[in-house]
Image (tube, helix red, strand yellow):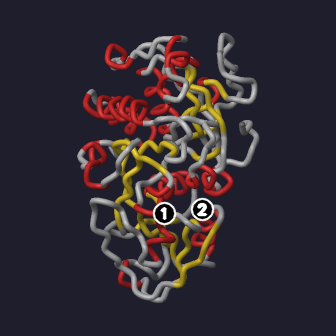
Amino acid sequence: MSTWLGTARGWRRGLAPRVAIMLVAVPFVGSACESDDSGGNGSGSAANPDDKLAIVTGRGTLLLPTDPAYPPASFAVKSAARRPDTDCAENELTGPEVDGYDVAVSKAVAAALRLEPCFVTPTFTQQLAGNWGDRWDVAFTSIGIVRSRMRNLYFTQPYYATPERFYVRRKGRIRRIDQLGGARIGVCTGCFADLYLRRRLDIPGTEVRYRVRDPVDVGYAVERDGLDDVASGKLDAFLCQETVGKEAISEGLPLRSLAPPAYVAYIGGALDRGSTTTTKAFFDRANGVVRRLHADGTLERLSRKYFGKDYASAAARFDLSRIGQIVR
């Protein structure tokens, strides 16, 4: 199990928080959904040790990956006290120690299942690879739904949908997307943007329009490095989630986005297809919680709180049946 000091997606994304703010954490017991999703304690695991839902409810905790350095989706809360009555292991973060939109969604799902959320920090690559070995249960870590990832992961109803945009220097010569032909464009290596520039992005249920001809794809392990290079004039543009670009601008980088967005990324909860346990009951429960969090407005409120904008409503309208997954 990774400790919170291990390498997480923040290393790859590179957007470390400048100021950590204590926010109100979602409690791990009770929610608007609890009457539909009570899990019970103790008996489930013994009744069926090969069923993921039975194991999780019997354990009493929900193991969730997170990135302590990817604001505003996830970040460590400075000087936060560890929950004193926690059932989380010593190498797992408790709820008060992390915050952000992804984290708040994770906590809300745990609350609906009447489980305590416990957070670990595997790398983003480890999460995408599947075969988690039950080291964590479900990931709400901004993993976009794309066909190639479905070989390793199941996806719940998306819990937010964010435009991905080209970012250029605020006072630079590039004012329109049609000026990016042949330009040097930075992307997160292996991410949506990388696939887009290589014209290999397959988002199930949506049509992707490729707007740039013959770009020079410049890969970055850390998104912030690429955005910094655009600001300094070393790179023509950078393609990334609107939430990431807005965060960089809020931190002072002289950038602006180009309209329209290149495409929209639909972000779902992810479960391991390679799990050695039966996953369907657990998937159905988690997916049902996400749908109800949409229906009661929780996800919209959380999106406005952490992002300052509603990225949830578009995700609620996504037809998950169109991706054609069969959960076992």
| Mark 1 vs 2: CB contact within 8 A | yes
- The disc, 1 or 2, on the residue closer to the chain's N-terminal end is 2
Q: Residue 121 location in percent, x, y?
A: 66, 41
Judging depth in this view, the residue of 174 and 328 nearest the camera is 328
Compared with residue 80, is residue 264 higher up or lower down, i.e. above or below? below
Q: Quadrant of the C terminus?
A: top left
Can you identify the residue that label 1 sits on? Answer: 240
- The Cα atoms of the two marked residues, 1 and 2, are separated by 8 Å
Q: Residue 203 location in percent, x, y?
A: 36, 62
Q: Residue 16 location in percent, x, y?
A: 65, 48
Mark 1: amino acid? Cys
The tag on residue 223 is 2
Disc 2 residue crowd, few under 14, some 14–19, many 20+, Cα 10 Å: many
Disc 1 residue crowd, few under 14, some 14–19, many 20+, Cα 10 Å: many
Q: Residue at the spot x=29%, y=29% of the render?
A: 292
Give residue 217's quadrant in the image. Answer: bottom right
Mark 1 lies on a secondary structure that is strand
Mark 2 lies on a secondary structure that is helix
Q: Residue at the spot x=35%, y=83% of the render?
A: 178
Q: Is residue 169 visible?
A: no
Mark 2: amino acid? Glu
Give residue 219's quadrant in the image. Answer: bottom right
Judging depth in this view, the residue of 273 and 220 nearest the camera is 273
